[in-house]
Image (tube, rainbow, N blue to C red):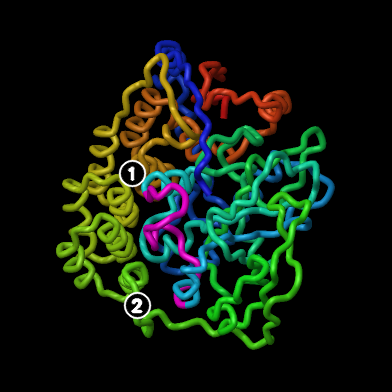
Amino acid sequence: MNQFFFLIFILISAKSFALDVDCKDSSPSLLEKIAAPNPEFKHRGYISPDELNQLSSRQIAELLVKRMHRECDEIRGGKTGKALEEDSDIMMFVPSSALDGIAKFGFQNQHSTRTSNGTNDRGFRYAAENTFNQMILGYGPKSKEVLPKYAALDLKRADNIGQTITPNHYGDVIFVMKKDVKKRTSWTPADSLGYHGFRQSKVPNTLKFKEHKDLNFKCNIYCEAQIWGPLDYSDVEYVMIAPGVNVPESLKTAQIPVYFHKESNSSVKLQKGEIAYEANKKKIILTDPSLINPSNPIEKKILDAKMVSKLSTSELLKKYENTFDIDDKRNILGQISLAKNEESKKFLLQAIRHVSDPISRSEILLGLSFYGHDKEVRGIFRDFIESQNLPTPQSSGMATGMMFNSPPVDLLTAFAIVADTDGFKEDQELRDVIRENVKNNIFLTNWYEHLFLAAPLCKKIDVEAEKKFNSGYYPPFMGADFKIAPTEIPISKGL
């Protein structure tokens, strides 16, 4: 869900920003105010290798959405009334040609399939998905299961529908998900890779959101749903197809009810009509991936990526050296980062010196997060952060979409680890290097505030700004109007 972008202009006074952010030691308590770990996770800014080893991808997904609710819905939304989950459906549009693969592997995101009917740019999308949570999610086999699958959120209230279309360019078969899926679903009132100003934040809402009494949000083209964690036929309530179309055999085999769709007054403009296939109630049994015989190159890629998690450290290192595809190397590094042993540590310390891909470097840093009390490892972090000292943005510029100015994921990974990980967080030199880095690039400020100053993911709603947005005015992505408290890094009033 990612074809619509808004062009926006950035007007930033680099000189005033540099003068306003005084990073001298006038505020000794500033960097001592390290954010406490989230109740849901061990760390505020990243999912640790330990957690990836211990939790299922479904559990991690539910915790991520629970965290969004606590730090966003409860700050930006209303206190009374119906939650959005009570009056909405999640509809995923997929091409009928993908049904056999879905039956075998479940619904996959483009990080696994490497295909998309929207923007097919895994690096760009991954940066956006980390920014959604201001949390580093990782890129190994289990992490990619956590990363979202995109769908349309079908809203029933006329107040929220706005100018909408049926997003059937994504596919001709429409899966309507069970209610249980909603607890690991977030949403945006427009395409999540394009700019949106809703509630003055890049972070999505969850379906527990209760609308603010002063405002109604409007779906713009469509409201997008992001479903986190694994998703398969067992999560489907029913399917809709066009009137007169034959019911696909894959759906009959899976015993999923199928309806012909008809027009509705909801935001997606479709609802179920006459029954096309009435399934029985037998339980859907998923196929063991290790028993699957891939029938096409996409299925083979998915299976190969999944099977990486079955390999020993030695096998992973050998496979990494013999692999030249960047996506495959990232996937293997993601699995190596989970191994807490001397073999993996030695490899990661060597790899960080010559790997240039930001996602790969992020995985290496995550693997080294085990070793915060190791002086050599902390030195690696310091040298890396200093080498990434980003230049101050120019006094004017242009960007498209909300994510083009996101800082590189490897630098954000280093920030997240240093913020609250034993060994790293006690290293004053590391924290000083980070302060200098933030001073030179305002796009790091939100992450810095969240990780080091215990700021919530979302800020309270700016009613006037939201009214302007809803009337067709699109404010700058990041404005020059900064207000600075005596002891704090500035907070942008734009987003």
| Residue at the image position 43 percent from the left and 49 percent from the top | 136
At 56% from the left and 76% from the top, the residue drawn is: 248
Residue type pointed to by label 2:
Pro
Task: Compare residues 26 and 368 and report the one nearer the observer.
Answer: 368
* Residue 335 x/y as whole percent: 32, 64
Left or right: where does residue 453 sit relative to residue 272? left
Magenta span main SS: loop
Say whether residue 57 is left or right of residue 235: left
Estimate how packed mark 1 is, as few (under 14), some (14 to 19) or many (20 or more) residues with alpha carbons within 10 Å.
many
Question: Does 293 sit left or right of 75 as displayed?
Answer: left
Residue 144 percent location from the top left of the image: 42, 61
Whether tag 1 and tag 2 are in contact, CB under 8 A, the answer is no
Q: How many marks?
A: 2
State the CA–CA distance, disc 1 to disc 2. 34 Å
Q: Residue 132 location, x and y as percent?
A: 52, 45
**Point 48% across, 72% down: residue:** 102
Corner quadrant of residue 291 = bottom left
Left or right: 319 as drawn, with respect to 137: left
Q: Is residue 375 above or below residue 176?
A: above
Q: Is residue 492 above or below residue 353?
A: above
Reading the image, the residue beneath label 2 is 294
The numbered mark at residue 410 is 1
Q: Quadrant of residue 433?
A: top left
For residue 148, the mark is none
Question: Is there any visible trace of residue 71 in the rendered image?
Answer: no
- Asked if residue 108 lies in the magenta stretch, the reply is yes
SS under mark 2: loop
Q: Is residue 315 above or below residue 6?
A: below
Q: Which residues are magenta?
A: 104-122
User: What residue is at 70 percent from the left and 54 percent from the top?
Assistant: 154
Kind of residue at disc 1: Asp
